[in-house]
Amino acid sequence: MYLCSLLYQTDLSFIAVAATEKEEENDHFLHSIRMHEDTELDNMAHMLNDEVSAAVDCTACGNCCKTLVINVTAEEVGSLANHLQLSEQDTKEKYIEESLAGNCYINTMPCHFLADNKCTIYEARFTECRDFPHLHKNGFKARLSGTLMHYGRCPIIYNVIEGMKVKTGFSS
């Protein structure tokens, strides 16, 4: 275990300040991992993600649901309509914005479906919601730049990145 679960940082104010203070360090980290093998990094990220995710209660935070634009597929609009027992048209009018290119996304931040830091459509939630923060996926190195965009908003990402710095022997 990389850190005792009691030592994981979950204070959003602390994480936001740390993100600003560590911008240059994180940029150096981004460049330093190029020398590591993809599989090695993926294995480290998966292990740390499993550990941190088990210790961090997302419902104590809900920051992703408060601050992220969630993309939604056409199929997911239909599933949501079905789940809410509304027509697709009514669902789109109430909850979905559509770009000129036809891309759909939730039309408010925080998300309509967040109540007391819990998802009210949890069983029918969108793929992007299910997958966030994407640390269980392969391709950590290729996605690190995008992941770092959320470093200051997600305790899981913050703690996994800090753990990756230790595991890779990074020093700023």
Image (spheres, helix red, strand yellow):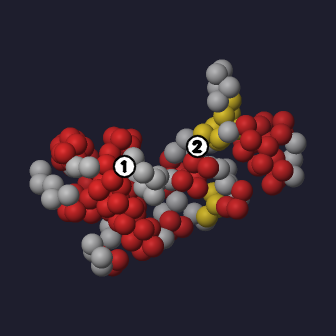
Identify the amino acid type marked 2. Answer: Ile
Give the distance between the C-alpha atoms of the residues marked 1 and 2, in whole angstroms: 21 Å
Whole-percent x, y for residue 172 in the image:
12, 50
Q: What is the secondary structure assignment of the residue under circle 2?
A: loop
**Which residue is at 20% across, 62% downward?**
166
The residue that disc 2 covers is 70
The residue under label 1 is 140
Query: Which is closer to the viewer, label 1 or label 2?
Result: 1
Q: Is residue 58 left or right of residue 47?
A: right
Please, which residue is most extreme toward the left here? Answer: 171
Q: Quadrant of the N terminus?
A: bottom left
Q: Residues within 10 Å of mark 2 (few under 14, many from 20)?
A: many
- What amino acid does circle 1 point to? Phe
What is the quadrant of residue 136 in the picture?
A: bottom left
Q: Position of residue 169 (x, y in %)?
A: 15, 59
Q: Is residue 50 above or below residue 127?
A: below
Q: x, y percentage for residue 105?
A: 64, 38
Seen from the viewer's position, the closer of residues 18 and 139 is: 139
N-term mark: 1 or 2: 2
Location of residue 22 with respect to 117 vertically, above or below: above
At x 48%, y 70%, the residue is: 57
User: Horizontally, is 73 left or right of 90 in the view?
Assistant: left
167 or 151, nearer to the observer: 167
Q: Secondary structure at mark 1?
A: helix
Q: Is residue 120 visible?
A: no
Mark 1 Cα-neighbour bin, 10 Å: few <14, some 14–19, many ≥20? many
Q: Is residue 76 visible?
A: yes
| In the displayed structure image, the side of residue 1 where residue 78 appears, left or right | right
- Asked if the residue under mark 2 is in contact with the one under mark 1, i.e. CB atoms within 8 Å, the reply is no
Q: Is residue 99 above or below residue 48?
A: above
